């Protein structure tokens, strides 16, 4: 029953579990502050626990997992991805000493696969964020160009108008830039003039 938590700066996020018992085990880790995904820090490697109610590195977690979930042993592997991110793959069993030394390379391999998947997801998310930032930057640049041409102001003044109009209209700079670009220079004048009613310093004339 292997859950796959990801630890980012101490915060644990479970990406996948195989059943309700595994999810309950993750919940116990959060409640007790103990368990395979708690306080991993820079730790890496494999830990095998043959008796959760016996010689367990996480005594409170082990006791409750045994009593409440009828889990008696576990095998866990931690992989460090850097930047405070760790991937923890843990298998639980209801019998004592269910995992043998020859199982350790298997869970290490599965942990490496899980880590590669998480790294791929992170890289995709960063790429999406970069692409979004580039799109936003281009739109803001285009909006500034429209404002400069329409209001006959320099770049600094155009940025000031866009920023302060954003604050007064409770619309983000990015969203306001989209409106300016989408509707053209006449609409941008209208937007700026509407905000200028409330703040005369925004009027370029």
Image (tube, rainbow, N blue to C red):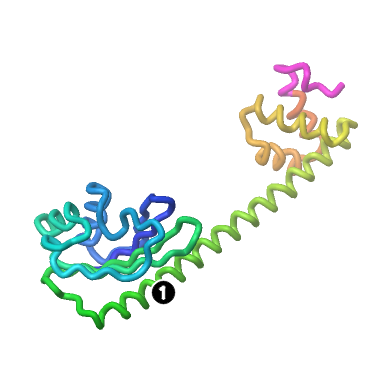
Q: Where does the image place residue 169, in percent across and percent down from the top left?
A: 65, 27
Q: Nearer the viewer, residue 184 or 162?
A: 162
Q: Where does the image place residue 26, in percent across and percent down from the top left?
A: 26, 56
Q: In the rendered image of this protein, does residue 27 appear above or below residue 190?
A: below
How crowded is the residue under tag 1: few (<14 C-alpha within 10 Å), some, or many (20+)? few
Q: In the image, what residue occupies the spot 76% across and 27% down?
A: 192
Residue 48: quarter of image:
bottom left
In this picture, which residue range is highlighted in magenta?
Answer: 194-205
Q: In the image, what residue occupies the spot 25% across and 83% down?
A: 102
Q: Nearer the viewer, residue 174 or 160?
A: 160
Query: The N terminus appears in which quarter of the rendering?
Result: bottom left
Q: Which residue is mark 1?
A: 113
Task: Check if residue 200 falls in the magenta segment.
Answer: yes
Q: Where does the image place residue 71, in percent across and percent down from the top left?
A: 14, 63
Number of numbered tags placed on the structure image: 1
Please identify the residue farthest to the bottom as the structure is shown: 102
Please identify the residue farthest to the right as the structure is shown: 152
Q: In the rendered image of this protein, does residue 100 appear above or below residue 61?
A: below
Q: In the image, what residue occupies the spot 80% across and 39% down?
A: 144
């Amino acid at each position: 029953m292997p859950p796959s938590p990801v630890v980012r700066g101490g915060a644990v996020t479970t990406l996948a579990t195989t059943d309700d018992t595994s999810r309950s085990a993750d919940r116990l880790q959060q409640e007790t502050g103990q368990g395979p995904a708690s306080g991993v820090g820079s730790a890496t490697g494999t830990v095998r626990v043959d008796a959760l109610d016996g010689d367990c590195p996480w005594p409170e977690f082990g006791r409750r997992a045994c009593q409440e979930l009828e889990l008696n042993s576990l095998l866990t592997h931690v992989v460090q991805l850097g930047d405070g991110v760790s991937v923890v793959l843990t298998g639980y069993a209801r019998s004592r000493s269910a995992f043998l030394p020859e199982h350790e390379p298997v869970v290490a391999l599965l942990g490496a696969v899980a880590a590669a998947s998480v790294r791929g997801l992170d890289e995709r998310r960063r790429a999406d964020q970069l692409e979004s930032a580039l799109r936003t930057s281009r739109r803001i640049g285009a909006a500034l160009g429209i404002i400069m041409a329409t209001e006959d102001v320099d770049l600094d003044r155009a940025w000031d108008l866009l920023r302060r109009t954003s604050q007064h209209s409770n619309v983000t700079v990015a969203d306001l830039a989209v409106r300016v670009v989408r509707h053209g220079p006449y609409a941008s004048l209208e937007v700026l003039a509407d905000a200028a009613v409330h703040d005369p310093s925004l009027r370029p004339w």
